[in-house]
Image (tube, helix red, strand yellow):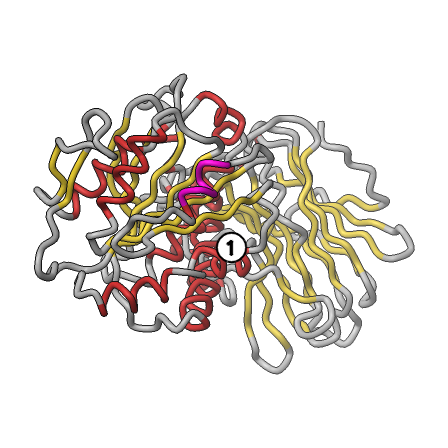
Amino acid sequence: MADLKAKVVLKAKGQEAFIPLKQMMVSLKWTAAVDLDLMAFYKAKDGRIGGIFSSRYAGGTMGNLNSFPFIQLSEDAGVGAKGGQNEEILRVTKLDDIAELYICTINFTDAVQKRNIAFNTYDAHVMVMDDKGESVAVPLDSSQPGTVAIIAKIDNSGFMGAKLINENRIVDMATFQSTIPAANTLNLSSKSPEEIKADNHLFELKKKATLAVKNAGLEGQKAVISMALDISGSMQDTFKKGVVQRVCERLLALGTRFNDKGSVDIFLFGEKHYEVGVLKEANFYGFVDREIIPRYPLEYETNYAGVMERIVNKYFPGAMKKGGGFLGLGSGVTVRRQERYTGLPGLVLFITDGDNFDQRQTQNVITEASKLPIFWQFVGIGSYSFPFLEKLDNMGGRFIDNANFFQVNDIDRISDEELYKRLLEEFPGWLKLAKQKELY
């Protein structure tokens, strides 16, 4: 049972108790295996209205303790429907300007599916505690089915001071949004709070990417962006810990700055090579767990050349032919230089945690691909050395320098700004030279 140790418990609907106007904490506690979200909606004495609810929801704001409305929600507990002692907290530092404050909750999953539920099965209550430890509680015990629970109301409109009132009104979303101040700011899309949080994060990443593109002098530059990801066995922890998903999100934000589709083509390489599909804003959430991990088991070897040929052949069909060989040794590929390619230049973001087994073939591909308008940005992740990629970065014999390499021990710890800066370090110079050489 949810721990209810309040000095005063308002058990009956409509029952009320006076509370202090100074600092207070409003907590929602429950024990059922559901993920409830605490929310507050207010009407100020000057007529202003607003809502305080998780920023994981579209339009959500956590509030502010240092300026109006002087109300702030603690971070969404995100309990993920786990039973036990669950709690979300709302803090109030000043109530003087507020006439009405409604304390509410919803179960996101049920609300999105417009499913009426019985909140009294959640073993939940709201507790209001002042800075001296005095507390008043309101159990959430209405048996009325509905979508939103309006648990309590703080009424500060009278001359005698603020009072807490047991509301226990369970209503549907339409009634809630038409009767509670600013409740229409709560946007219940079909996306979960976690998806909305991811959308908000991507939005912030795109702002950083836009600035990085501007600083690199690439505003207005169009390009086809692709990403090649290592799926060798040593990448297991990197996938498992969500690092690859976070890398995809960061690079997607950069990719959206270069093409109208706002997308990045995803390729994989290990012993073999694959084209996964398109990463875009509409499908980025959970992309790695959904599209890569279940479909492409990790492989024992790391080979670069095959996926590089696959990428070239996708964007420049027929340009790269088998045969010839590198320095006359064995089979290889050749590119016959054409006048000028009419498509967009390409930028390949190549992510790996180790050197490869097919170094001679890779040298052949990168040399021949230097005749094409495609730039290879290699990124080594982890603490192992990358002597081959360092050599490739400075290799001679190419039509133009078409590759760059840098290493990051922990890609999660490098700032977004620094990552974007390094990814775009040599791309502008290559674009200029490729243009001069009439590659595009």
In the foreground, 43 or 328: 328
In which quadrant is the N terminus drawn?
top right
Q: Is residue 388 magenta?
A: yes
Residue at image position (55%, 33%) is: 80
Residue placed furthest toward the bottom: 46
| Left or right: 334, with 212 as reference point | left
Q: Position of residue 353 (x, y in %)?
A: 49, 33
Q: Which residue is mark 1?
A: 419
Residue at image position (8%, 60%) is: 339
Q: Secondary structure at mark 1?
A: helix
Depicted 170 relative to depicted 427: above or below: above
Amino acid carrying mark 1 in the image: Leu
Q: Position of residue 121 (x, y in %)?
A: 57, 30
Residue at image position (69%, 64%) is: 71
Q: Is residue 133 magenta?
A: no
User: In this view of the protein, can residue 282 be seen by the observer?
Assistant: no
| Left or right: 13, with 418 as reference point | right
Which stretch is magenta?
387-392
